[in-house]
Amino acid sequence: MRKLNVWAVRLMAVMAFTSCSQAQKAEKKQIAEHVIYIGLDGWGSYSVDKADMPNTKALMAEGCYTLEKRAVLPSSSGVNWASMFMGACPELHGYTTWDSSKHEIPERVILKNNIFPTMFQLLRDAQPEAEIGCLYEWDGIKYVVDTLSTNYHAQTPKGKEYTDELCKMSVQYIKEKKPVLGAFIFDNPDHVGHDAGHDTPEYYANLKELDGYIGEIIQATKDAGIYEKCIFIVTSDHGGIDHGHGGKTLEEINTPFIIAGKGIKKGGEMQASMMQFDCAPTVLEIFGLEGPQVWVGRPMMEVFE
């Protein structure tokens, strides 16, 4: 009889713990109503200290950041934008090179839309009426964002006369649509890095220009009346060295991740280790969501209040 009583007490304790855990999971809440996600292709962490980027550095001061978010290998665009948006490593999502228009390995899982699950898709499933958009300069972005899960996606025209076009389009989109998730992916400083070289005066001049665009995007949220409800993320797919990237140097694989806004600590430099595929789970955490089992990324919990 005594043994039965002991087991009964243990069973009740397990049931209470389970119920408590389920209740905590059910109570997971959305942290902010809007996420403005800005990507700068080819922006290496090595450049941050020397760069004249007042808008970006204001976000760093107001929120949390790391300059040691590591790109997956190879340190190229397609594989890293895929890992960033898909919360998984190349062996799972199937993109393994700079080219995002095709898989080298079949996806481990396809939930819908004939694509490995993305943060855009999972937000769409959770919030069917949400305004979700992605604007970009490099056409390779459209293959890894799951455009069927967006309300709006668009590529800017090509040509030097359209240098500021993505900024203009982004500002207009934010003011008109007030996106729940808006991703704005610039194709620089990557081109400048290839042409003039990384860690050159031309590279830093381009970063200053891009920072101006970031300032205009932030101002657009104020004009739209959503600034106080926003979280801003600024990050990159890879860095570079000399005139290229794709290798294993820290200049190529260390990338910035900056997050600030509603519900984000004024915590300064993050202590947690971060990989490229941790970006998507962190975005989902903002919306009170969890990624699928196939994702290997983790949300950066230390940034949240």
Image: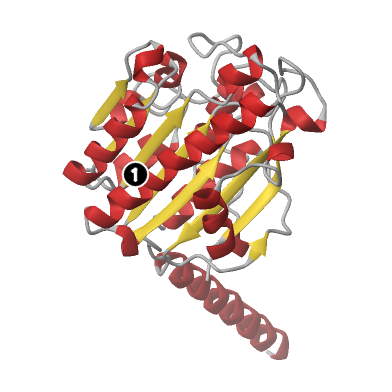
Q: Is residue 270 above or below residue 79?
A: below
Q: Residue at x 60, y 37 (%)?
A: 277
Q: Residue at x 34, y 22 (%)?
A: 113
| Coordinates of residue 21 in the picture (x, y in percent) | 52, 70
- Foreground pick, 147 / 70: 70
Residue 303: give x, y in percent of width and height.
Answer: 58, 62
Residue found at the far bottom of this picture: 2
Q: Secondary structure at mark 1?
A: strand
- Seen at 66% across and 80% down, the residue is 7
Residue 166, position as x, y percentages in the image: 35, 28
Visible residue check, residue 1: yes
Whether residue 290 is visible, yes or no, is no
> Residue 298 at what x, y percent from top left?
61, 49
Q: How many marks?
A: 1
Figure coloring = secondary structure
Quadrant assignment for the N terminus? bottom right
Which residue in the structure is indicated by mark 1? 181
| Residue drawn at 63 percent across, 12 percent down | 195
Q: Nearer the viewer, residue 271 or 299?
A: 271
Label 1 crowd (10 A; few <14 / some 14-19 / many >=20): many
The residue type indicated by label 1 comes to Leu
Q: For residue 50, which quarter of the picture?
A: top right
Up-down relation of residue 22 to residue 93 (above or below):
below
Q: Taking 2 as reference, is 88 left or right?
A: left
* Residue at the extreme left of the image, as rendered: 176
Front residue of this view, candidates 185 and 4: 185
Q: Is residue 230 above or below residue 249?
A: below
Q: Quadrant of residue 70?
A: top right
